[in-house]
Amino acid sequence: MIRTFFATLGRQLWRNRLFTLLNICGLSICICVAWIIFRMVIYENSFDKKVPDAQNIYQLIIRNKREDGNTGGFAAVSKPVLNTLLNDVSGAGLVVPMFYKQYNSVTIPGNNGTRKIEEKEDITQVTTLPAYFDMLNYKWLAGNKTTAFNHPDNVVLTEDKAKKYFPNLSPAAMVGKSLVYNDTLWRTVSGVVADLPYPNSFSGDNTEFMPVSREDLTDQDWESLNSSNLLFIKPAKQVDAKNILAQLNKINFQHNKESFEKYKYKNWYEALPLKEKHFAAQFGSQTRTADKKVLSDLMIVGGFLLLLACINYINLSTALLPKRAKEIGIRKTLGSSAKNLMVRFIAETFIVTTFAALLSFVLTFFAVKIFADFLPDGIFDYMNYPAMAGFMLLLILLISLLSGLYPAWISSRVDTVEVLKGKTEKVIGRNKITFRKSLIVFQFLIAQVFIIGAIIIGQQLQYMLHKDPGFNKEAVITFSIPYRLANKKEYKDKQFVLKNELLKNTEIKNVSLGDRPMEQMYVGNIYTYFNGKEEVNVQLQMKDVDTAFLHFYGITLLAGNNFKQTDTTTALVINEKAVHAFGFGSPREAIGKQLLVPGNGRSYPIVGVVKDFNQSGMRSDISPGVFVSDKERLRTFNIKLPDQPQHWEKAIRSVEKEWKRIYPEAPFTYTFYDETIGAFYKSEMRTQTLVRAATAMAILISCLGLFGLATLTAFQRTKEIGIRKVLGASILGIMRLLSKDFLVLVLISLMIAAPVGWWLMSKWLQDFVFRIDIKWWMFLFAGVMAVIIAAVTVSYQTIRAARANPVEALRTE
């Protein structure tokens, strides 16, 4: 019985294999998308779930409020907080510092010679306390947490890092081995721990652990905040974290009271629950975070695509009903009940959906390769098999019900007498076609919203990449002197030697030493101006540059002069924003005014004012800024290449040659500055790619649905077309007759999609200070695209129907 049931279902699917294939393809694409999104969601939500007693662990974060009422915050603590929590605050329980330090190289002494590892990215070390290993359940492969930090020069390695340093040794044999960081810092391996077997917001697999130094434990600088210094607490039993914070903030206020009053700001500490850390991007220092809003948006997009696929299945399935009318009529004559017919259709849908799910796994393999840059690292290493199996089964059942229920219900209402008379065109009435047309409108509504979004996102991205930032960034490469070399005596001031040698090179147009005009790193300080009545304190974004910098980047000097190169700072050049922030009436009025730097208590004159330029990308407004000149801090080279790109390679080779002569210990690595600026908009580029992919899928699925409706319409109007052709209608006229209804549907969907798309993209653009205006042609372009796509989709069926032999259409039944 069951065998016969599935055999007849298989024959039915094969007989209509074109429609079966279209349904499988449409569903498989959407199941693939849903599967990847589901894997992302469960992976991101799995972070820190397996940390023991995670609900009672908190990260301390800093909050601040300025005089103007603006508030902010980030993940950092001042180092004295550690000692305060250990000794002066009751109920703190476990106090776990994580002070990150970076090194450029590590040397591994050995009996067979010394091996040195130099990393392109810094080697990360975390200084902490034994309590760190009480908070996290590491498995010790060698050593133990009781003795691992007995000596201040000990180091504990994670398994991956240990294998990298000592590839041929067992964990036990590694204990006692020496490591030398940055050629001078000797450490002894005291333990090896297995990598944490679950996603977490703590140190990664390549991290190394050191005991907190005595200097860190006795530090008394309450004002210094560094995002490399993190601290976690696990309050003692029956102790509320708020009680610990109240004690800490009271001590913090006592130490910072003078600064709070003088500079009219205040800061305080709060506790961020560990369960929220992975989604707290603002406090995600040192570890990757996820955005809940992005995940929600992805789920919404996935849901819409699945809905489109279900609508597409409904359209294609009901399009086939007139062709299956006799089969349905005979089954009802032989005793099949409406319930049996509905079960049969839903079972058919289940089989199609199952095949689509199997195909989706193949598509997932290719999709993961294509969109690798958009997926979080480790997503496919995390396996939650019960959740994955449950999701796929639920997805198949849900799609089967949503897609199969309506066609099954329609099939159960077929009039057996009319069908057996041969009147198959009466299987579906006009009201059903109206319902199906509304589904087509909905499909193209979603597709056109995606098209509008893709157009506007693309235009905004092009605007950000090509808008004049206030400086000339073309044909520029940049590179920096490694920190470990800059601090060596033998390389002191070598950057100026290299600069002079490069200036002699006729293949290079210009050279400047200084921080890039626009970059992700932010260095700032509070400068004070006394206007005769009161002090005006302004946070200025600082850039260390040489005297060639302004000319090199074409930054316009509005008043005053460039400063002179000196060993230390003696003068300042500020931008227009700083002029307004200090209350100067004009750039010329600012010249000669003295600004006090609170950190060193010295005042410097303003000698020049430059035109505003963008320092932090198009999302942010231009900040008040200042140029200073201090030879000790000039470590970044800016090289202007020839105007002709064909000469760039030769010029870069000549730069590399000089670099290797002066800095033989370090490899020469450079970046084109326009690529550095492009990295500012990596998130927007990813969004653009994802929206384009979603647009392509929405259009494809909508076209499949439109194809099904065109097939149905051509079948139902066969005799009408035959009569029109006999009466002299042309093929072009028949095509126009059959196509116009579909084009009207597309235009209706555009009328609805335009305001929806405008509202959604207006909300998205609000995140950018510098943004485009939404123009009418964007909606027109989306509409034209949709019309062309719809016309191409229905053209096959309309041409086929228009060219059919009218004699065949007009045969008696």
Image (cartoon, rainbow, N blue to C red):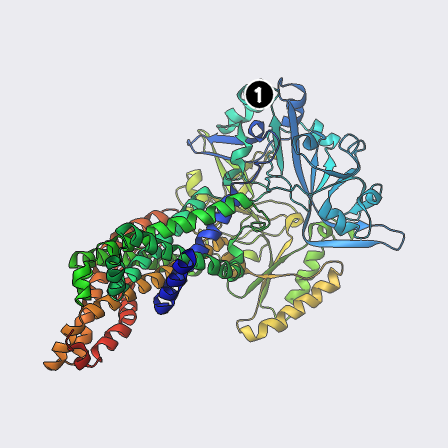
Q: Where is residue 283 in the image (x, y as percent from the top left)?
A: 53, 38
Lateral position of residue 409 relative to residue 360, left or right: left
- Placement of the C terminus among the 4 image quadrants: bottom left
Q: Nearer the viewer, residue 220 or 311?
A: 311
Residue nearest the viewer, comparing 389 with 257? 389
Q: Is residue 298 visible?
A: no
Q: Nearer the viewer, residue 631 or 456?
A: 456
- Could you say which quadrant of the image residue 332 lies in? bottom left
Camera-side residue of 14 and 524: 14
Residue 130, given in percent of the width and then of the height, sits at 72, 30
Q: In this view, does 449 lie above or below 71?
A: below
Against 797, residue 328 (above or below) is: above
Which SS class for mark 1?
A: helix
Height in image: 253 above or below 732?
above
Q: Residue at x 54, y 73 (%)?
A: 645
Asked whether residue 725 is in view, the answer is yes
What crowding class fits label 1: few (fewer than 14 Cα within 10 Å), some (14-19), or many (20 or more)?
A: many
Which kind of residue does numbered mark 1 sit on? Ile
| Residue 597 screen position, x and y as percent | 56, 36
Residue 638 lies in quadrant: bottom right
- Left or right: residue 407 versus residue 578 is left
In the picture as drawn, the residue positioned furthest to the right comes out as: 111
> Where is residue 359 shown, x and y percent of the image?
47, 61
Q: Identify the residue position indicated by label 1 in the image.
A: 244
